[in-house]
Image (cartoon, coloured by chain):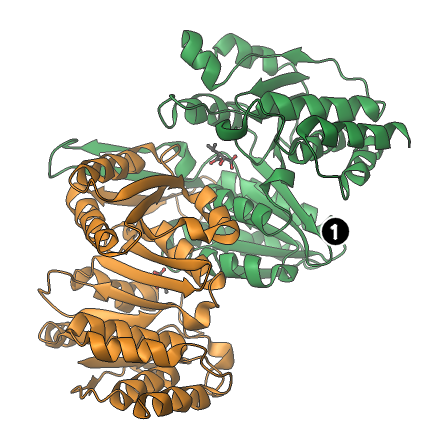
Chain colours: A green, B orange
Amino acid sequence: MGVIGGDGIGPEVVAEGLKAVEAAGVRLDTVEYDLGGARYLRDGTILPDSVLDEWRQLDALYLGAVGAPGVPPGVIERGLLLKMRFDLDLYVNQRPFLLPPDVDMVVIRENTEGTYAGEGGFLRKGTPHEIATQGSVNTRMGVERCIRYAFDLAERRPQKHLTLVHKTNVLTFAGDLWERTFHEVAAEHPDVETAYNHVDAACIYFVEDPQRYDVIVTDNLFGDILTDLGGAVSGGIGVASSANLNPDRTGPSMFEPVHGSAPDIAGQNRANPVAAILSAAMMLDFLGDTDAAERIRAACTDAPAGSTTEIGDAIAARLQGD
Amino acid sequence: MGVIGGDGIGPEVVAEGLKAVEAAGVRLDTVEYDLGGARYLRDGTILPDSVLDEWRQLDALYLGAVGAPGVPPGVIERGLLLKMRFDLDLYVNQRPFLLPPDVDMVVIRENTEGTYAGEGGFLRKGTPHEIATQGSVNTRMGVERCIRYAFDLAERRPQKHLTLVHKTNVLTFAGDLWERTFHEVAAEHPDVETAYNHVDAACIYFVEDPQRYDVIVTDNLFGDILTDLGGAVSGGIGVASSANLNPDRTGPSMFEPVHGSAPDIAGQNRANPVAAILSAAMMLDFLGDTDAAERIRAACTDAPAGSTTEIGDAIAARLQGD
Ligand SMILES: CC(C)[C@H](C(=O)O)[C@@H](O)C(=O)O
Ligand SMILES: CC(C)[C@H](C(=O)O)[C@@H](O)C(=O)O
């Protein structure tokens, strides 16, 4: 397993995640990778091909957060985080949100295309007649495999309910492909109840009526927005976990908290490690150790307030007491 | 002034808006236009050029909501609502949110380009190799005039604070144009304090810390999302008003509530008319009758609960009692 602590609070929270895994009695071989904004500022390295090739032999990657002040926007995001998602074909970004009794939902975010493809450019840059374009690329293959994953997941949950979120009334091309594919796959899953919401309406429902959601499937950018909002309405971004999955297991999957590197509180032992710990639990799930994953999740319930290490220690103590 | 009641609850809430205007002692010449999803289903009419030409001679348009079940997604949105915004060059979509003591912000949404341009298409449609593209088109001219409007507005408010919201770390082309333009215009407004947030982070702040915002400027799609969310965190979408402005006054501006046609509660006298009434107040502001606008806003404060007409009558009574 590869570990990328990354920048800011990343290494601090990853340490607590690994502590919880160990306390749950799971032994993982770890290899650490020093990558992220700080490394880039130090020697210009972002993500060497040799590292990417090494990773292809692993089963999982565990990442804290990347991004540092002083690095131009996009450099690390595009060169490291999105490169991992794209080159390792981590096409499902799974983000669960749980805050009983109101919130129990999972967002399945397409993770390898859409506006994240980086399509676009400038015309007459720097002049009064400049045009900047930014394209969203959506393939039937990419949309379908993500939607299929979401239906399979919904089918395994008690509520068996799946909502497509898009903006079909404005994004008529991309929206049409998503909607058509959704309906076609739905026909193969008559036991799953389906719904559709525009993304703007979904934001309202996240705040006012999150109970209506079970599983949500959506595109890359809408998923980015909805999952930060999902964190905000279910205990805060400090507890929001995520898995970047290659469900076909042709390479490693990657597990990371939804939150960023939060440079403003880095190094102060103040970050909430629960999101990272719950992401480690998602990793154990994916690696087949559902029992340890469940125990970690249980140990995170009503985690005490405190410093990063205090919270991590308390959770580890609960696990060792199991 | 042109009045388009539209579909669903649109005509009901528009009637209350006009009632409030009259109760505030303002006389407006109105011409009604029967347009929207229902009209389209009846005779195929969406927005004839002749109507658009008539509108060019007016100073304002007041719209309820458009969109009806049975109309394919995008037909009315693109053919009527977005056509108004684009063809009448209503390049600023201004949406204020007020919920003392926490929320007092105005979102300035670019209203004539971005992904709303409708750029895109299909390749190999209906095959397993289908690709659907959707483009965002951003011009220096379009971005700059919107940002200038936002700085001018921020300058006139006590807090003098303006936040750019985008996703510069992923949408590197469009984001770069927005950011560059923002910084250049900022240099001309040293008295306005500025900030930048990624759209996903902004969604969290809307829920957890809306006090941080005064004026926000953002692109068309992010503005769509943020303003529905803004409604949800400041009293509900039933009170969220909006103005689609042509600040150069080369044609009419258009005023409409943020909410949609809500077909599920149409015709039941259940819709909250406050969003439409506050939109009418924005119209009076723009037409120069700031005094009447202020009185209408005051009359909407702590509006009683009740049916559409009860709320409208109560607000009208307050205005007549002024
Ligand atoms: C850092 C950024 C590129 C990333 C994204 O937009 O996907 C983050 O916000 C996330 O949600 O994982
Ligand atoms: C109806 C729809 C096209 C519209 C938009 O997306 O702009 C609406 O959501 C709005 O915010 O005015």
Does residue B140 appear anywhere in the picture?
yes
**Chain letter of the residue beneath label 1 in the structure image:** A
- Residue A267's quadrant in the figure? top right
Residue A204 appears at what percent x and percent y? 51, 61
Observer-nearest of A219 and B304: B304
- Residue A317's quadrant in the figure? top right
Residue type pointed to by label 1: Arg
Does residue B45 appear anywhere in the picture?
no
The structure residue drawn at horizontal position 38% and vertical position 39%, both measured from the top left corner, is B167
Crowding near the residue tagged with mark 1, few <14, some 14–19, many ≥20 C-alpha atoms within 10 Å: few
How many numbered discs? 1
Residue A113 vs A268, above or below: the answer is below
The structure residue drawn at horizontal position 22% and vertical position 77%, both measured from the top left corner, is B291
Observer-nearest of B25 and A213: B25
Q: Which residue, given by chain and number where applicable, does mark 1 sit on?
A: A157
Observer-nearest of A28 and B228: B228
Residue B130 appears at what percent x and percent y? 43, 42
The structure residue drawn at horizontal position 80% and vertical position 21%, both measured from the top left corner, is A22
Look at the image and tell me in which quarter the C terminus of chain A lies. Answer: top right
Residue B313 vs A175, above or below: the answer is below
